[in-house]
Each structure stands twice: as structure tokens, then as C-alpha cells.
Image (spheres, rainbow, N blue to C red):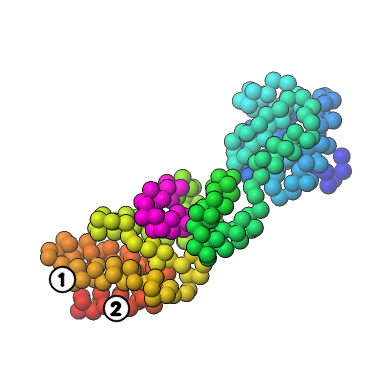
Amino acid sequence: MTDSAANLITPASSQNFQRLLLASDLVLVEFRADWCAPCKALLPVLQNIAADYAGQLLLVTVDADQEAGLCQKYAVRSLPGVLLFRRGKKVQQWHGIVPESRIRQTLESCLPPDYQQTLASVTEAQRLGQWQQALTLLKPAYDKAPERPEFVLAITQTLAALAAENNDASYLEEAANRLQQCSAEVLREPALAQWQTRLQLIRQLQAEFGELFPDLHTLMDPFDPGDSVDGERLAPLRETLDSLLHRAQSGADADGQHRARTLLVMLLNTMADRTLAQTYRRRLCGSDE
């Protein structure tokens, strides 16, 4: 075995096995033994596969003689035993000399699509207002890589836009459910944290006004947050802002004023049009003087 070939292999033990399963989206594991001739014949095949999928696949070997506990846990009853894991979960298991083509076929079905190409197509569909097309493009990629922040953000934005376009709150529920399924690490992304706040706000606005907040697009600009939205698109947002400001300044009761003020501040904090947000923030602060 050459040094370069050896570098493609990561030996595992019971102490580091679980950690290695999470070290790559896809992990290919060979349970083997030094005395096992089929194991020795299969290993170069697995190394070729690992070389072709460098950066996408981690090749791990386990000494079955030394790690009987792992063999028992993963039901490895004959050698070689080859297991494929995706994001820490076993998706396939083979025993004996498995054809290289079969392993490659399974790997291809597990690999995510071209991320950048997919995102470029999604962004173009969003730019054109083709939200259903954007969702159709996103779902397969998201299902294969649900922890990629850019996919989570894009599908959340798209579902919110579809909710506005169809006046259908079920899209918002789906967006909220997808965010809830994300790990805490993913949700630390500022844009996703902001969207959690937005979804909470939209639900509260819906409860306050008795209908789904019109034109949710005006809460954000998914293409360039620094740009202002045009006047026609801003009209529904201005109506909501004016209504909340009026209630916050002259509501019939203190509780209603406080509720309106809280919603208004949340809305201003989530708006992409910072110039408009600042204008209303000054008006709100002026009413407190």
C-alpha cells in the first residue's frame, strides 16, 4: 500500500467511531481483519472510490478482531462487512465482495446535487417571482442536505412568499416546522435566527389583524437586503405600520397599546428596508416624548 493510498483510510475504534460517523456527510466503513483475503482484495476498490469522491466521502476501517462490540452493534457477521452511513445513520450494508458499481450507484443516490447550480437556479426563480418553481427546485436538494444553512434560508423565504401569494398560512407552518428540525448550530446563523423571529411576528400579526399579513415579501428582500422595495409593494406594509403606530399611540387601553408597540418594534427589527424602518422608529419614539 502506497503512502497516498494509506492516507485515504481512517482506522476506527469504539472510542472514536461515533465521532468519525459525523466527520463527513457520507462515511464508508469496512469491517475487516488482517487474515481475511477478501478484505484485502476489497480494500483497494474502496480506496479508488474514496479517491474519486474526495471531500465528499470518508473511508473508515474497523479491525473486527479488536472491535467485537462494534461488529455486534452493527450486525457484522461475516467479513468483509461494508456499511455506508449518511449524516451518522446507516443507509446500506453489504457482506462479502461487493461489486464496485453497486457501491458507486448507492453513493450517487446519497450525494447532494450541485449546490451552487441549484442555488443559482433557485435565486433566479425567486427574482422572477416564480415561487412554486423555486420550491420545486429546492425540495430535492434540501431533503438531501437539510442542515445546509443556505438551503434552509432559501426554502424558508420561498415558503413565506408562497404564503403571501396564496394567502395560505399552511406554508408558514411548514417553514416553522423545517426551522424547528434544524440543529442549534444551524439556527445560530444570523439570517435563520432572524427568520424565526419573522415567523413568530407573522403569526402574531395574523392573530392581531384576523388575517394573514398581506405581501410578506415586504418583510424582506431575499436578493439584496440593502435595497429598498418599490412604493407599490410597500403599500400593504405601510398600512400595517400605520395601523400599529396608531394603536401604540392612541389605543383604547394600555394593554392594547403595549401589544401594538411590541408588534411594531418586532416588525421594524425584521424589515429589510432599513430607511423605512428608521422613519417609523423615529415616529414611535416621538410619541413617547
The residue wearing badge 1 is 250
Q: Amino acid under label 2? A: Arg
Determine if the magenta segment contains residue 168.
Answer: yes
Dominant secondary structure of the residues highlighted in magenta in the image: helix
Task: Name the outermost residue toward the right.
Answer: 2
Q: Residue furthest top?
A: 77
Q: Is residue 163 left or right of residue 238?
A: right
Q: Of tags 1 and 2, which is closer to the observer?
A: 1
Q: Residues within 10 Å of mark 2 (few under 14, many from 20)?
A: few
Q: Secondary structure at mark 2?
A: helix
- Taking 170 as reference, is 93 above or below it? above
User: From where the camera sits, is residue 258 visible?
Assistant: yes
Give yes or no for residue 15 being in the magenta stretch.
no
Q: Residue at x 72, y 37 (%)?
A: 105
Q: Position of residue 58 (x, y in %)?
A: 70, 43
Gap between marks 1 and 2 measured at Cα: 17 Å
Looking at numbered disc 1 in the image, what kind of residue is underneath it? Answer: Ser
Which residue occupies 28% across, 63% down? 263
Residue 135, compared with residue 221, is above or below; it is above
Give the residues in magenta: 155-178
Looking at the image, which is closer to me, 192 or 19? 192
What residue is rendered at 77% in x and 29% in y?
98
**In the image, residue 21 lies at what x, y percent?**
63, 39
Residue 15 in view of the camera = no
Q: Circle 1 — which element? A: helix
Query: Which quadrant would residue 73 be assigned to in this image?
Result: top right
Dot 2 corresponds to which residue?
A: 282
